[in-house]
Image (cartoon, rainbow, N blue to C red):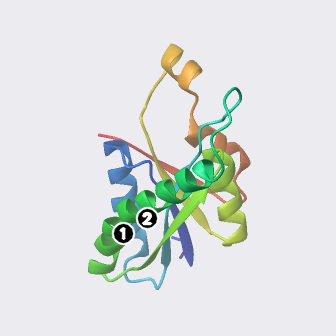
Amino acid sequence: MKTFHRILVATDFSPASKPALKEAIALAKGNGTKLLITHAYSLPSLTEAQPAAGVYEQLNRNLKTEVQKKLQPLVEEARKEGVEAEALVLSGVPFEAITEAAREKKADLVIMGTHGRTGVPRFFVGSVASRVISTAPCPVMTVRAA
């Protein structure tokens, strides 16, 4: 099997993301592979009402801080297994942010969980995983939630 040097693991903090992180840790363990444990958030669009000066920026800072706090235990989980890991907080449309980060960080592989939605729910919600698969600069492994 190919040895990966840098794996980007995308999480949305849902139960569907947990098996993907475990798979990433297993692939990285003992290989000197670095994990970039990533979450992409997007700010709500403000089309009608304009917030007071600084409110939007404060919201962005608060979201970024909250994401960082949620990523830290995942990074620690990987480190406890002897895997080099770092948190990567992304902002923007999730599939675009993940794809761009994979490109910029020169990831060899992207791993992400899937919710397994099909039919109408997938049509309306869309699939970040399917969009990453079609746009990523490297292979993408999806891990379906149990």
Tag 2 residue:
68
Q: In this view, which residue lies farthest toward the top?
A: 120
Q: Is residue 26 left or right of residue 132?
A: left
Residue 134 x/y as whole percent: 70, 43
For the residues bearing labels 2 and 1, Cβ distance under 8 angstroms: yes
Q: Secondary structure at mark 1?
A: helix
Image vertical order of residue 138 relative to residue 3, above or below: above
Please give the label number shown on residue 28: none
Say which of 43 and 111 sits in front.
43
Say which of 39 and 85 sits in front.
39
Residue type at tag 2: Gln
Residue 110 x/y as whole percent: 56, 59
Residue 31 x/y as whole percent: 44, 83
Q: Secondary structure at mark 2?
A: helix
How crowded is the residue under tag 1: few (<14 C-alpha within 10 Å), some, or many (20+)?
A: some
Q: Is residue 21 left or right of residue 60?
A: left
Residue type at tag 1: Gln
Image vertical order of residue 114 relative to residue 18, above or below: above
Residue 89 x/y as whole percent: 54, 63
Please give the label number shown on residue 72: 1
Q: In this view, which residue lies farthest toward the front?
A: 52
Q: Which residue lies at the image location 71% right of the left edge and 29% below the top edge?
A: 47
Say whether residue 2 is visible. no
Say which of 52 and 37 sits in front.
52
